[in-house]
Amino acid sequence: MKTIVVLGAGLAAAPLMRQIMRTTVLTRNNLKMIVVAPNTHFHWPIAMPRVVVPGQMADDKVMFPLEPIFREYPADKFEFVLGKASALDPSGNIVTVALNAGDNRAISYDTLVIATGASAKDDMPWKVLDTTEKTVERLHSLQRDIKSAKTIVVAGGGLTGAETAGELGFEYAKSGQKDVYFVHSGDLPLAPPVLQSVRKQTQTELEKMKVKMVANTTVTKATRMGRDTVLELRAADGSTTTLTTQAYIPTTGVTPNTAFAPASMLNGHGYIKQTTRLQAEGHADIFVVGDAGSLEAPKAQNAEAQTIHLIKALPLHLDGGALPEYQVNTKDVYGVTLGRSRATGQMGGFKLFSFLIWYVKGRFLGTDYAPLFAAGKKTMMTTFEK
């Protein structure tokens, strides 16, 4: 019996698991799959900027239990191991797993798929925080802070920061209920390759909602003092000031979940070095998809494209066939939701209409199809056979 081990159960892994189980593992006598992940629920990150706003979306709109999804697979062909990869020995084809229940387990593989994704910095629930329980606990704590706050500060000028500032501005700032600040290091929100016109519209829409923009500034320190958090801010000219808030929401990027991998497999930023056939460099039996890999920026659309490619390529690999090359995405596509009624974005060098992005993304932030994504039956752009 040959074993496919999949590390991760998130955006990149969910469609891959179901489709490889259906098309390959269940149709062959000599294959089984083992999935390793520390989370009991699939986490839908696209909607999190709206979920953090108290009362907007229930937990079950963005977190879906894995057990009912995995239950349909026979035990002799599929196993779910609740734990986190802690070490990888590529020469021995063994991954060591730190089990959630305690102790360690060594798992042998014939083919390994690394889809461990990335974690949000600053202990924020934009991504899974180790376990589902920790993620829910942190989310609810953040919602309580926001609900009772008079002043809210969002820090970090990327997509998550802009969307979160938009949701909070729509809910609180434009009506004067709460002050919402958006601290970002550039002259405008977002950054190239996002078009200048898209960046300007993002700022304009946030200002219309009375979000207080603090440009060319970074948060250098956050100190909790009772219910308040005192932020030390440094401007681009080197000057410093402080800002007191009751809800501090950093959106300062991600760290790849690759600490288990040997240093020789990682690039200088901690991502697994990934070939255009989605294999780990120098390891023909290890595949990498999504945010853990070095090939493309950690974005949901890139993870999806890589996963769809591997769904087709992995059976060829198992049969000893030549692998097709993955085409790296060269067209920049962004959809930025700004509150519950406005949006902006681009496709390549063209700015898109606000209504189009609101209609496609902003109405539901993908929660209308997230259950199907969790079950591996759909991605953002592809629907598989049920």
Image (cartoon, rainbow, N blue to C red):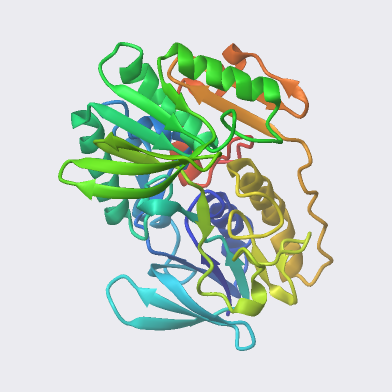
> Is 83 positioned to the left or the right of 146 in the image?
right
Query: Farthest residue in the left direction?
Result: 226
Give residue 353's quadrant in the image: top right
Is residue 213 or residue 239 the one in the foreground? 239
Q: Position of residue 24 (x, y in %)?
A: 63, 61
> Is 243 positioned to the left or the right of 166 in the image?
left
Q: Is residue 212 above or below residue 35?
A: above
Q: Position of residue 185 (x, y in %)?
A: 54, 38
Q: Position of residue 241 (x, y in %)?
A: 38, 38
Q: Where is residue 20 in the image (x, y as percent from the top left)?
A: 60, 58
Residue 84 in sight: yes
Write the residue at 51% across / 66% down: 7
Residue 358 in sight: no
Q: Quadrant of the C terminus?
A: top right
Q: Quadrant of the N terminus?
A: bottom right
Write the residue at 60% across / 37% down: 383
Q: Is residue 298 above or below residue 165?
A: below
> Is 331 positioned to the left or the right of 345 in the image?
right
